[in-house]
Image (cartoon, rainbow, N blue to C red):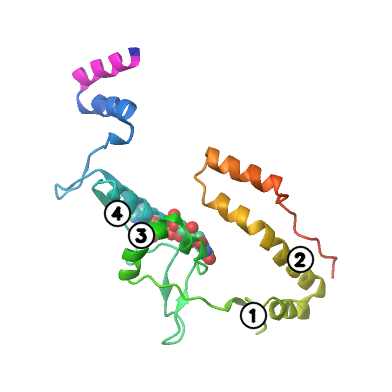
């Protein structure tokens, strides 16, 4: 009660700033600061950066009725999730992120799936998903066929190929716990419960199998 009395007294003497503080303390999310721009527009929130997280935050807030502005300094929105023709015409490359499975399986995508698809979002599954080209012209690629990938790694180092197989086998058991944890708010009781469940299931963090020096 004392803090409320002091905040309300401040509100009377200092106006909006203290009023906002009082609102924040006692109204939780009902408190909405007001931001303005040079055109006289007023916003409840200003998000800096139109990457996937910034855009998701903006969508969450506007779904709650907030008036949101998103400011982006790059010519194209998307942050580190962008595709462009940067080599030969017709060849489209993911410039940064390329495995969007986490996003595709996220509660955010589930909640906004229809509108995102209508706006043009489309996932392109790829069996041969990524590769690294080396300066000497050789390359190493990863694909969904475990043995095909292990075979390529074995050409470089047979012990590493065995590590790859072991990690792939361990991942099947660990994946449900990892994805459940990634989908939990941090920090939260839910995250703690998920971690405890993973520990009980034996899904402790594993160290990568060590490969003998080649
Ligand atoms: C090389 C690379 C590979 C990745 N691979 C994957 C992957 O395969 N799968 C996966 O799930 N994730 C991957 N990630 C991670 C994923 O891309 C990021 O988690 C995601 O992009 C983060 O989104 P964000 O909105 O937080 O930030 P960002 O995507 O970085 O976006 C930030 C935005 O803010 C803008 N900005 C910054 N400062 C200002 C400013 N002062 N004013 C205005 N605008 C500003 C930037 O221009 C940018 O558009 C990868 C990231 C990188 C860099």
Element on which disc 4 rests: strand
Where residue 20 appears, as percent x and y from the top left, is 26, 29
Q: Does 102 sit above or below residue 89?
A: above
- In reply to whether residue 6 is colored magenta, the answer given is yes
Give the overall secondary structure of the magenta segment. helix
Q: Which residues are magenta?
A: 3-14
Relative to 19, say whether 175 is above or below: below
Mark 2 lies on residue: 166
Other residues around mark 3 within 10 Å, as few (<14) / some (14–19) / many (≥20) = few
Mark 2, other Cα within 10 Å: few <14 / some 14–19 / many ≥20:
few
Q: Is residue 83 left or right of residue 16?
A: right
Q: Which residue is mark 1?
A: 135
Q: Could you tell which of marks 2 and 3 lies nearer the N-terminus?
A: 3
Is residue 24 in view?
Answer: yes
Question: In which quadrant of the rendered image does the C terminus lie?
Answer: bottom right
Q: Earlier in the sequence, mark 3 or mark 4?
A: 4
Task: Determine the CA span between mark 3 and mark 1.
Answer: 42 Å
Q: Give the percent coordinates (x, y) of residue 11.
A: 22, 21
Spatial separation of the CA atoms under disc 4 and disc 2: 44 Å
| Location of mark 3 (residue) | 112
The residue lying at 41 percent from left, 62 percent from top is 79
Query: Which is more foreground, mark 2 or mark 3?
Result: 3
């Amino acid at each position: 009660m004392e803090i409320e009395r002091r905040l309300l007294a401040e509100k009377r003497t200092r106006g909006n700033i203290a009023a906002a503080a009082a609102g924040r303390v006692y109204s939780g999310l009902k408190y909405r600061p007001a931001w303005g721009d040079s055109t006289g527009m007023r916003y409840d929130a200003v998000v800096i950066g139109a990457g996937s997280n910034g855009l998701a935050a903006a969508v969450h807030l506007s779904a709650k009725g907030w008036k949101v502005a998103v400011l982006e300094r790059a010519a194209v929105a998307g942050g580190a999730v962008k595709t462009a023709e940067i080599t030969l015409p017709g060849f489209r490359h993911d410039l940064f992120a390329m495995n969007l499975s986490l996003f595709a399986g996220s509660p955010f995508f589930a909640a906004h799936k229809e509108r995102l698809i209508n706006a043009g979002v489309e996932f392109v599954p790829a069996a041969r998903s990524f590769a690294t080209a080396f300066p000497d012209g050789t390359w190493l690629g990863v694909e969904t066929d475990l043995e095909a990938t292990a075979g390529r790694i074995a050409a470089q180092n047979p012990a590493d190929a065995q590590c790859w197989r072991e990690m792939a086998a361990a991942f099947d058991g660990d994946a449900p716990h990892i994805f459940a944890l990634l989908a939990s708010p941090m920090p939260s009781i839910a995250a703690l419960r998920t971690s405890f469940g993973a520990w009980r299931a034996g899904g402790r963090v594993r160290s990568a199998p060590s490969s003998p020096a080649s």
